[in-house]
Amino acid sequence: MIINSFRKPTLIATVASTASTSAVVAVVLALSACAVGPDFKKPELPKAISFTRESSGLELKGGADIKADWWKSYNSSELNKLIELALKHNPSVETATANLKVAKQNTIAQQGFYFPTITAGTSRTILNNGVSGGSSLNGVGGAGPGNGAPTYTVNSAGLSVGFVPDLFGGNRRAVESLRGLENSAKYQLAALQITIVTNVIQTVSQETTLREQLRMAEAAERAAFKQREHLRRMAAVGYISGIELAAQESSYAFTAAQVPSLRKLHEQTLDLLSVLCGELPSTKLEIPTIESLKIPSDLPVAVPSGWIEKRPDVKAAEEMVKSSNAQIGVAIANMIPQISISGFTGATAGAFSALRDSLNKSWSETLNVNQTLFAGGTLLARKRSAEANLESSLGQYKFAVLTAFQNVADTLYALEQDKRSWEIARDNAQANKKIYEYTQLQFEKGYVSEPILLGVEQTYLVAEINKMQAYALYLGDTAALYQSLGGGWPGVGK
């Protein structure tokens, strides 16, 4: 009852001598410090002195690391609760967390091959030799060859030990590869968490804006309706022409059409926010108002030479390069001789009660050396495949780095223009508000008619809507800046 732990199918040598096996084991352990295949070298990062083509008002020039809970810089308790809910219950986070657990256990499983495999077993075999008469088995009386019965029983019990020394480091390369996949899964989880936080902030910003737009659109519709009814009465008595009335009818229809469109977008945005938080669309969430969301007073900063190390997606791509690099060593290790060692100690007898008899004890040692001489080019093809996969991983890493620089550059350009657009829209809204307030005073004193007041009110409401849209875009892009710079890695590995 001997259990061998072979790693290769082609056996070319078997050694069963105690002295020779022990000597070979000593040599194997002495040589097992090496590992075939190339050692991992971290890919070089591009040298950059600026994120953008020209100097930007928001060019980043150094600063502290981004905090893990960076979203608290928006100073909204409602927003904080929504983000915490999303990080805890979003199904994508649950999936990524489970994938990380899978990767960890795969690494642990591969590390198990560093140690011997020990098994215990017992067996009972009934044989028939087709003859009668004979002697007892191993000095134990009973059925057996030569005792007059053609059928006899053999009982065996013992321990088997199998060990595959990692002579050329093939298993270490396999562990290294799996460790890279594990680390990549960890960084992918971090990148996902940052993306979810950013999406929640941008969705909340959009929802609050749509909520205000809807409120103002409804007010504008009421103003347009009043103006239309006023012109209808004037047209009925001949004070205005049919063309003027038709123009107002068209204006009212255009204004009224904004309401159902905005209401649809608002409800769909609420549904999206619920799903991001891992809740059903019917769930009522506590959402902040647009006024309570403040642009962070101190936006994150970084320099081109150091920030890239904080991007979890770039780190994930780097770990994939490490994993692919280690697979070359695994492929090379499979092309060279494989050694396995096994041993057995136990007893064999005709009856279980006789297994303790010292005469029935047995043991064995076996050293197996395997070398594949021909496999149809399979092993060489696998090595070349691993080398090509490394080239692919390096390409993906370079793309991740370039995309990261693009994200920062895009965000810097966007923030610069968003801030300018919001300031213009804000000033325009303030100006139209003053015009509307002055016109109200004039209307109350009889200096202007109601249609003029209603027209000014509609213009003011449109200016407020434009201001809200500009603010929401600016707010959302500040979250995109945090994301592009690495996002602080909230709750990695939890």
Image (tube, grey):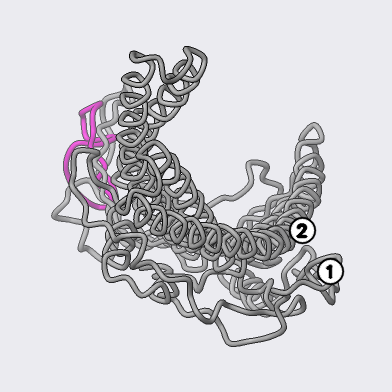
Identified at 32% across, 54% down, the residue is 445
Secondary structure category for the residue under label 1: loop
Q: CA distance from mark 1 to mark 2?
A: 9 Å
> Magenta region's main secondary structure?
loop
* Location of residue 117 (image quadrant): bottom left
Magenta stretch containing residue 280, yes or no? no
Q: Amino acid at mark 2?
A: Leu
Identified at 32% across, 64% down, the residue is 79
Q: Which mark is residue 402?
A: 2
The stretch of residues the image draws in magenta is 137-156
Above or below, comparing residue 202 to residue 50 in the picture:
above
Q: Amino acid at mark 1?
A: Pro
Question: How far across and down, in percent of the image, does residue 448 sit?
Answer: 40, 45
Magenta stretch containing residue 152, yes or no? yes
Identified at 84% across, 69% down, the residue is 46
Of 379 and 58, nearer the camera is 58
* Location of residue 148 (image quadrant): top left
Q: On the image, numbered disc 1 is attached to which residue?
A: 46
